[in-house]
Image (cartoon, grey):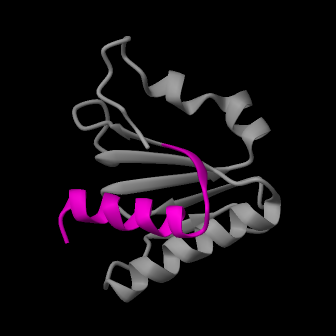
Amino acid sequence: MNTEELLKLALDAAEDMKAVDMHSIDVRGRTSVTDHLLIVSGTSARHVKSIADNIVTEAKKAGQAPLGVEGEDVGEWILVDLGDVVVHVMLPEVRDFYNLEKLWSVDSDEQARQH
């Protein structure tokens, strides 16, 4: 599965669980850790966990078991590492505080996609 297919899988899995404010950022050339960041929000800790669980489930079904999942115990911010795509599922207030979109933006012409 290529990077674009993996990103679509994660987007679709998040969308299936009614994730909100989905934003993907192409970070190729800015880090060697991953190619894309996908940042999505859930409306409650339970919703955040459900979104992350669905992404993990769908990735496993596609033969792309996550390299790691962090933050499941609290549910405010769960990171799902799919290798070429790293997904951050966050509560809105946590997302506002850390502002990953701004952190990874180079300038106003950044090539992020809004979904």
The quarter of the picture where the C terminus appears is top left
Q: Is the residue 79 above or below the residue 30 in the image?
A: below
Left or right: 56 as drawn, with respect to 108: right
Whether residue 74 is visible to the viewer of this picture, yes or no, is: no
Most common secondary structure along the magenta stretch: helix
**Residue 59: percent from the left, percent from the top?**
40, 77
**Residue 40: percent from the left, percent from the top?**
57, 49
**Which residue is pictured at 67% across the width and 31% down the height?**
98
| Residue at the far top in the pictured view | 108
Whether residue 61 is visible to the viewer of this picture, yes or no, is: yes
**Which residue is pictured at 42% across the width and 45% down the height?**
37
Q: Quadrant of residue 3?
A: bottom left
Q: Tell whether position 5 is magenta.
A: yes
**Residue 54: percent from the left, percent from the top?**
56, 76
Q: Residues in magenta? A: 1-22
Q: Quadrant of residue 97?
A: top right
Left or right: 111 as drawn, with respect to 91: left
**Which residue is pictured at 61% across the width and 62% down the height?**
18
Q: Tell whether position 2 is magenta.
A: yes
**Residue 55: percent from the left, percent from the top?**
50, 71
- Count of picture labels: 0
Q: Is the residue 51 above or below the residue 39 in the image?
A: below
